[in-house]
């Protein structure tokens, strides 16, 4: 286990250095960038090691896996981020453990999350996921629908509109894709000045995301290694 701890510590240091270098490159303060370590497919023992190494923000993309991990690891002081595509019938489960939901992409989902949060007596941070790939099957609101979803979140009782989230499409220069977020973000900020978060960037494109203003990067494989089973 010492081996794994050292490996995670080394990888975290590399990621922090990449973030610092990216911030230097665009004149930003690294303190503005929160690293969410995406632990999907990795065992609870890894999450414990990460927590011991000072990681506070962890991300998961499947409710089935995340709900078990969050319950088993409830003794740790962690902020749980749900980053995966979300069906309405999973809203109640996700709300029971997630502190932040990154993948709010339609008004019907806002209503389901809000009702669930009322029942659980919880408050959540919510990000509106923007589709940058134009493929409705892969999650994210069309850019033209983002403001309507953001307004629904802002009007809900239990969801705080924290900002926007996006995943760069495969096969496109991530910098070009992330650049499309700026006008949308500006539009949302004009109406909702507290919605300052931008969750963008993963292991392969966190530099481009930071240059495009990301406040949260979601990093999996650069910290934990290649996922054992890719779904
Ligand atoms: C898995 C996942 C990540 C992390 O991806 P890596 O390439 O392993 O860093 C980030 N965001 C979402 C939505 C994911 O599903």
Image (cartoon, rainbow, N blue to C red):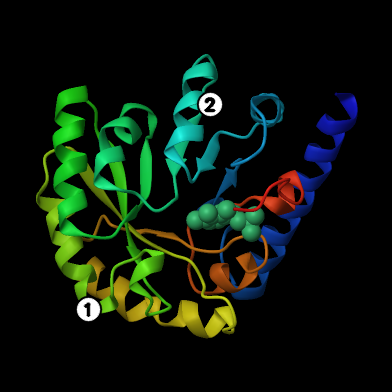
From the viewer's side, name the closer residue of 221 and 62. Answer: 62
Residue at (90, 30) in percent of width and height: 3
Question: Is residue 230 something that shows in the picture?
Answer: yes
State the residue in front, 230 or 123: 230
Element type where label 2 sits in the image: helix
Q: Residue at x 51, y 33 (%)?
A: 65
Q: Which residue in the protein does label 2 denote?
A: 69
Report the residue at 67% width, 30% height from top. 43
Indicate whether 192 appears above or below 16.
Answer: below
Q: Nearer the viewer, mark 2 or mark 1?
A: 2
x, y percent for residue 136: 33, 72
For marks 2 and 1 on the same chain, the one whose residue lies earlier in the sequence? 2
- Image quadrant where residue 101 sits: top left
Residue drawn at point x = 20 percent, y = 32 percent: 117
Q: Return the x and y of residue 213 as percentages of the image width and height.
A: 48, 69
* Spot occupied by residue 51 in the image (x, y as percentages of width and height): 64, 27
Q: Which residue is outermost to the right?
A: 3
- Quarter assignment of residue 205: bottom right
Callout 1: 10 Å neighbours few (<14), some, many (20+)? few
Q: Is residue 210 above or below residue 127?
A: below
- Can residue 216 be seen here? no
Tally of numbered tags: 2
For the N terminus, give its image quadrant: top right
The label shown at residue 144 is 1
Q: 142 left or right of 85?
A: left
């Amino acid at each position: 286990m010492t081996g794994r701890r050292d490996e995670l510590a080394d990888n975290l240091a590399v990621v922090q250095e990449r973030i610092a270098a990216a911030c230097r490159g665009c004149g930003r303060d690294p303190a503005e960038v929160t690293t969410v370590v995406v632990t999907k497919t990795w065992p609870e023992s890894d999450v414990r090691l990460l927590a011991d190494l000072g990681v506070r923000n962890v991300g998961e993309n499947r409710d089935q896996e995340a709900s078990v991990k969050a319950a088993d690891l409830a003794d740790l002081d962690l902020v749980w981020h749900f980053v995966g595509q979300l069906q309405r019938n999973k809203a109640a489960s996700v709300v029971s453990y997630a502190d932040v939901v990154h993948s709010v992409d339609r008004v019907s989902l806002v209503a389901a999350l809000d009702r669930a949060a009322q029942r659980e007596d919880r408050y959540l941070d919510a990000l509106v996921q923007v589709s940058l790939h134009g493929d409705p099957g892969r999650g994210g609101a069309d850019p033209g629908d983002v403001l309507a979803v953001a307004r629904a979140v802002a009007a809900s009782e239990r969801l705080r509109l924290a900002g926007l989230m996006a995943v760069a499409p495969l096969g496109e220069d991530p910098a070009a894709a992330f650049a499309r977020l700026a006008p949308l973000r500006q539009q949302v900020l004009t109406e909702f000045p507290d919605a300052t978060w931008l969750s963008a960037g993963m292991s392969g494109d966190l530099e481009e995301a930071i240059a495009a203003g990301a406040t949260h990067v979601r990093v999996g494989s650069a910290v934990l290694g290649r996922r054992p089973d890719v779904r």
